[in-house]
Image: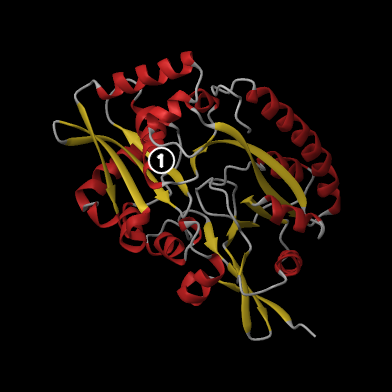
Amino acid sequence: MTDWSLTLHASITEIGATAWDRCAGDDNPFLSHAFFLALEESGSVGARTGWLPRYAALHDGTVLVAVAPLFLKGHSYGEYVFDQSWARAYEQAGGQYYPKLQIAVPFSPVSGKRLLIDPAQLAQDTIAGVFGDALRQACQELGLSSVHMSFCTEAEQDVLAGHGWMKRIGLQYHWHNQGYADFEQFLEALASRKRKAIRRERREAQGCGLTFRTLRGPEITAQDWDRFYTFYQATIDRKWGQAYLTRQFFSGLSERLGERVVLMQALHDGIPVAAALNLAGRDTLYGRNWGCEGDWPFLHFELCYYQAIDLAIAEGLARVEAGAQGEHKIQRGYLPSLTYSSHFIRDPALARAVRPFLEEEREAILQEKEALASFSPYHHKNSC
């Protein structure tokens, strides 16, 4: 008889890097032990930001079979899947929505597995269902309102739906590599007008006396990170946000993740005036943060979209995830893609109110995705 147990951990160091990474795999750097350790050691997660680590570990007897990046939260900031309206409605009705549990990569709208199961385990769906039940039970025993899992896989969402979790979808814009030999071959897949527009944008971005370079891991100096952090803070200030990530986080990231950290810079007279931070997975380039000083035409598109495509083609990566939002990405080859999240709400009354909202939202998003597909810049309307 299987002897399942769930433990919660206030630090990633309580779960060894070897054990965590065995479960997480090496596909997605955002799920690595090193990434979460960099967040912790830099103070980017913790009491200051309201993301309190409670990493979940599922055991079969004494054997660790799965882990999940779980956080205790007193707000809904930094998640990119919005539930503030649920919180307001519940609190207006006399309930207490916060604190809640959140399974997520903090401050990062990147898709991927969230229930990280040791690949040596054969019954993956069974273990995922057990993990979902255990997280529900933890939510109940701790007296919390809910537990949420954002930007998970569709397969995880389907499994948890059979264990009392509710489904939610969203939209992002991803570029897919069709085996292009170079950027020009990618452009040839586009309609003539779109192709000309992108060439013009690249020409203007690169014609302002700027030079461009891409740095990997150990190549990124402390001075590079100092400049990048200035850009990061300026972007946060313009968007009225909060600078969750500390300066220490960025240097810790390149120290711990090495070549998987990709910093693309634009320089004027040898000084960086803009930069875009990416992390490289096994088959995906993930756009992370960007910032700029000055007003440079189309520079955001060049650094965040086109340079990313250049690198993905050169390294044979299957896709680029360029972050949240942005219908303008469609005209630049990034097509609408569904994202998935799962939600367990402990109070049946609140769950009954949220469920029809999610059903209506799902229908609206599917209709939006279909409508956006008509704006595809590709000759043959590549599949979204």
Q: Amino acid at mark 1?
A: Ile
Tell me if mark 1 has few (under 14), some (14-19) or many (20+) residues whose alpha carbon lies within 10 angstroms of its own: many
Residue depicted at x 70% and y 27%: 370
* Residue 313 coordinates in the image, percent (x, y): 41, 40
Specify the quadrant of the image occupied by residue 57. bottom right
Question: Which image quadrant: the C terminus?
Answer: top right
In the visual, does 149 lie left or right of 359?
left
Q: Nearer the viewer, residue 21 or 121?
A: 121
Q: Secondary structure at mark 1?
A: helix
- Return the x and y of residue 134 as percentages of the image width and height: 73, 69
Q: Quadrant of residue 217?
A: bottom left
Q: Is residue 236 visible?
A: no
Quadrant where the N terminus is found in the figure: bottom right
* Tag 1 residue: 313
Question: Do we see residue 79 in this rendering?
Answer: yes
Q: Is residue 308 above or below residue 44?
A: above
